[in-house]
């Protein structure tokens, strides 16, 4: 037993997972811990504007970034460093194209965008620059993750978060800029760290100037079908806030967003683990020896089931403690956020389970099939949220969020088993010692 524990401790997946969990915990803890300050200095309406602007940024990231980090992931172990550097350069070329297209669309619909976000023209336009900056940072981060460098990955994220939060608090508290200060803090740190990412990519040999039409075609062919998939994630995480803002008011959206902020408790665990788990799965599935691969597959399935059980138990415990956290954590103006926390936590838990299965879909490049599933779930999410919010109020959005997270998780589990067979139901072998 002692030998098994020692081997487990030294296993690269466990070691990297712990490092990712620690660094991501710090990264997520910073904005979570400043929540009391934000709720003290920002009215629910102001917090709602910040939440809506983040939803806008996330949508721009989808259409500008078109999930380019995914193609880096699937090709990283198949190409050498020089070719990956050429891929990254052509990705930047693609980003210039998508930014131009998105810019034209934003200018065309700038008035309705302003009205929905309750911000001025300057913030709407600068959102394009901020979103592009975040995509560039994501490319740098995904390469660190694939290199299995959790310390660099975590240090970058933590320092950016500290920069973001520090600037925001200075602008909100000292300069009394309210919600504008928070958005300026987000934007400034995003642009600064995008520049740092470009420098780091160049110095590490991951930015080789070489126009390649085939690479550009590959990027568009692989990444464009992922847009509906990304929109589905956006819809579950953000569309509900816009719906609440329009049907119940920006203040209600702010309270709802504050409640769902507690989902970070589960989010940082699932995302941090996935950062270590995904490269490990890709490496494992690339084993050419079929007998060795069969044994490894069985171990992956066993581990996945244990992970799911532990995650759901942890989520249940966090839900029980949520009322106490709200009472001691947020300003009284946000006390109604209590009713959203439990739904938020379990929604995020099922998103974490989904991540365990979607890795196999990406590995076999079945992004089109995934896009169909997730887009349908996304459409259902928006429709259900709109209907329920109009009937029973903002709590309807929480119900819809949970239901679609569960449904999407189950459907992707089925899709994963079909596109890449794994011994998910071979309980005789799974239960054997």
Image: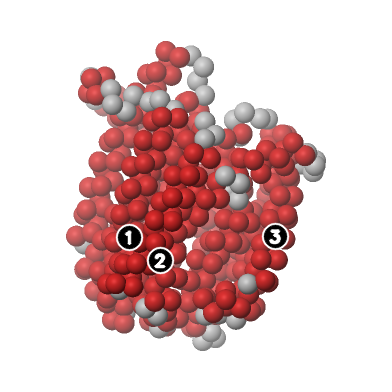
In the foreground, 111 or 183: 111
CA–CA distance in space, label 3 to label 1:
32 Å
At 26% from the left and 43% from the top, the residue drawn is: 310
Image: 360 above or below 315: above
How crowded pointer 2 is (Cα within 10 Å; few <14, some 14-19, many 20+) is rated as many
Residue 240: which numbered mark, if any? 2
Residue 408 locus on image (x, y percent)? 37, 47
At 29% from the left and 41% from the top, the residue drawn is: 308
For disc 1, the marked residue is 400
**Label total for image:** 3
155 left or right of 88 in image = left
In the foreground, 305 or 246: 246
Residue 394 locus on image (x, y percent)? 32, 71
Earlier residue among tags 3 and 1: 3
157 left or right of 313 in image = right
Residue 101: which numbered mark, if any? 3
CA–CA distance in space, label 2 to label 3:
26 Å
In the foreground, 19 or 256: 256
Label 2: which secondary element: helix
In the foreground, 174 or 380: 380
Asked if one can make out residue 75 in the rendered structure from this viewpoint, the answer is: yes
Asked if one can make out residue 143 in the rendered structure from this viewpoint, the answer is: no
């Amino acid at each position: 037993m002692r030998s098994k524990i020692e081997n487990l401790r030294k296993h690269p997946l466990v070691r990297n997972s712990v490092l990712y969990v620690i660094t991501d915990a710090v990264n997520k803890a910073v904005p979570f811990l400043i929540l009391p300050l934000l709720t003290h200095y920002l009215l629910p309406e102001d917090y709602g504007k910040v939440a809506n602007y983040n939803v806008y940024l996330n949508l721009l990231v989808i259409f500008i970034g078109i999930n380019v980090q995914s193609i880096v992931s699937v090709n990283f172990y198949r190409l050498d460093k020089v070719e990956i550097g050429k891929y990254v350069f052509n990705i930047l070329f693609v980003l210039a194209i998508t930014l131009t297209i998105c810019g034209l669309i934003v200018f065309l619909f700038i008035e309705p965008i302003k009205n929905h976000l309750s911000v001025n023209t300057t913030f709407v336009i600068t959102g394009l620059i901020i979103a592009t900056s975040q995509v560039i940072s994501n490319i740098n981060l995904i390469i660190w993750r694939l290199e299995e460098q959790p310390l660099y990955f975590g240090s970058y994220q933590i320092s950016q978060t500290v920069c973001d939060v520090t600037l925001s608090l200075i602008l909100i508290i000292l300069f009394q800029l309210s919600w504008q200060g928070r958005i300026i803090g987000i934007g400034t740190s995003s642009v600064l760290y995008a520049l740092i990412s470009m420098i780091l990519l160049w110095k590490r040999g991951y930015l080789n100037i070489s126009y390649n039409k085939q690479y550009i075609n590959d990027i568009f062919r692989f990444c464009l079908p992922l847009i509906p998939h990304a929109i589905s994630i956006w819809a579950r995480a953000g569309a509900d806030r816009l719906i609440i803002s329009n049907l119940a008011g920006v203040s209600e959206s702010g309270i709802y967003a504050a409640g769902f902020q507690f989902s970070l408790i589960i989010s940082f665990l699932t995302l941090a683990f996935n950062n270590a788990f995904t490269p490990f799965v890709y490496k494992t599935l690339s084993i050419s020896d079929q007998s060795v691969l069969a044994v490894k597959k069985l171990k992956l399935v066993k581990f996945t089931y244990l992970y799911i059980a532990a995650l759901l138990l942890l989520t249940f415990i966090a839900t029980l403690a949520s009322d106490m956290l709200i009472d001691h954590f947020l300003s009284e103006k946000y006390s109604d956020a209590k009713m959203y926390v439990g739904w938020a936590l379990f929604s995020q838990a099922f998103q974490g389970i989904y991540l365990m299965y979607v890795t196999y879909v990406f590995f076999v490049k079945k992004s089109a099939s995934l896009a169909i599933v997730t887009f349908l779930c996304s459409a259902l999410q928006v429709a259900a949220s709109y209907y329920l919010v109009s009937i029973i109020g903002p709590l309807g959005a929480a119900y819809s969020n949970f239901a679609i997270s569960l449904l999407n998780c189950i459907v992707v589990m089925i899709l994963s088993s079909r596109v890449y067979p794994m011994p998910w139901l071979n309980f005789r072998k799974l239960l054997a010692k």
